[in-house]
Amino acid sequence: MNKYQAFTVSIKDGSTYWQNKIGSINEVINHAKKFTKRKADLIIYNITDSNNCVFVKHISHKELNNE
């Protein structure tokens, strides 16, 4: 089973925040939409292999917030 983790990057000051580990990309996106209170880009990684972190997708703050 795949596991994904993402972090947000604030467009204001570049600060980052790692989100929770989740089982699907859609769950990661929905979680970020629900809990991210600032304008931030979302970077998603596949963390299924505990020895490797693989880039999956970048979602801009505009796309994440349907702007």
Image (cartoon, rainbow, N blue to C red):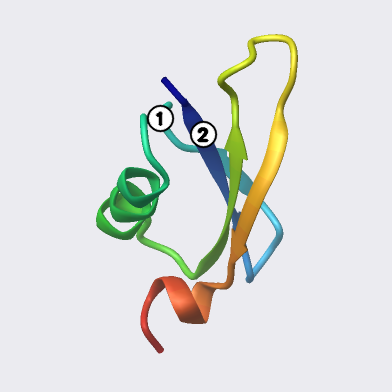
Up/down of 49 relative to 53, above or below: above
* Residue 33 rendering spot, x and y as whole percentages: 32, 60
Up/down of 15 relative to 38, above or below: above
Up/down of 61 relative to 46, above or below: below
Q: Which residue carries the number 1 mark?
A: 20
Q: Residue at x 56, y 20 (%)?
A: 48
Q: Which residue carries the number 2 mark?
A: 5
Residue extending farthest to the bottom is 67
* Residue 3 rendering spot, x and y as whole percentages: 46, 26
Q: Residue at x 71, y 58 (%)?
A: 14
Q: Residue at x 59, y 24 (%)?
A: 47
Decide: few, some or many residues near mark 2? Use Cα within 10 Å; few <14, some 14-19, many ≥20: many
- Sequence-wise first label, 1 or 2: 2
17 and 1: which is toward the camera: 1
Residue extending farthest to the left is 34
* Residue 55 rendering spot, x and y as whole percentages: 71, 43
Q: Residue at x 63, y 70 (%)?
A: 12
Quadrant in which the N terminus is drawn: top left
Decide: few, some or many residues near mark 1? Use Cα within 10 Å; few <14, some 14-19, many ≥20: few
User: Which label number is shown at residue 36?
Assistant: none
Q: Nearer the viewer, mark 1 or mark 2?
A: 2
Quadrant in which the C terminus is drawn: bottom left
CB atoms of marks 1 and 2 within 8 Å: yes
Up/down of 20 relative to 50, above or below: below
* Residue 38 rendering spot, x and y as whole percentages: 44, 64
Amino acid type at image mark 1: Asn
